[in-house]
Amino acid sequence: FLFKLRLAVNLTLLHSILNHHNYFYPTLTIMDFAKTPINVLRNICAKNNWTVNYDMISAEGRVHEPTFTFRVSIDETQSSAIAAGFSKKKAKHAAALQALKIL
C-alpha cells in the first residue's frame, strides 16, 4: 500500500512537471516519467544533444548515517541542481529531479 501511495505521489509530481514542460518537450508522455528521474533527464538530454554530468560534492556524517550531496549539470543549458540524500543513489535521483524542475 505504501509503495502504491508513494508511486502515485511521484507520478502526480512528475505529471505536473510534464504539463509544465509539454510546450518544450511535446514528445514526452507520462510513461517517460514512470522511469527514474535520472533516466528521464538522460532521455531529455539525449533528445536535445545535451551533456549531463553528475558530481559528488560531499559525503558527510557518521559511517552509519552518511549524507551525500550531488550536483547535476547540463553543459549546453548551463543549468545545475544540487540535492542531498542518505545514499549516493538517492542523492543522484534527487538532483536529477531538481534539474527536471528547472529545465
Image (cartoon, rainbow, N blue to C red):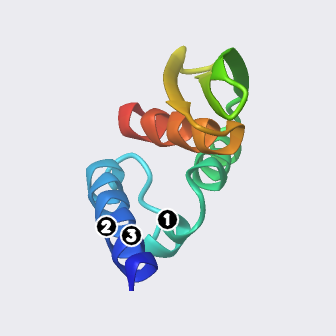
Name the spot of residue 50 as percent of width and height, x first: 67, 31
**C-alpha distance separating marks 2 and 1:** 12 Å
Residue density around tag 1, few if under 14, some if 14–19, many if 20 or more, within 10 Å? many
Q: Nearer the viewer, residue 31 or 48?
A: 31
- The residue sitting at 58% across, 37% down in the picture is 86
What is the three-letter code of the residue carrying label 3?
A: Arg
What kind of residue is marked 1? Phe
Secondary structure beneath dot 2 equals helix
Tag 2 residue = 9
Which residue is rendered at x = 37% and y = 59% of the image?
14
Residue 21 location in percent, x, y? 34, 49
Question: Which quarter shows the N terminus?
Answer: bottom left
Question: Helix, strand or loop at disc 1?
Answer: helix
Q: Earlier in the sequence, mark 1 or mark 3?
A: 3
Q: Residue at x 45, y 77 (%)?
A: 3
Is 46 on the left or on the right of 80, as rendered? right
In the rendered structure, are the residues bearing label 2 and label 3 in contact, judged by CB atoms less than 8 Å apart?
yes
Would you name the residue on which mark 1 appears? 33
71 or 78: nearer the eye?
71
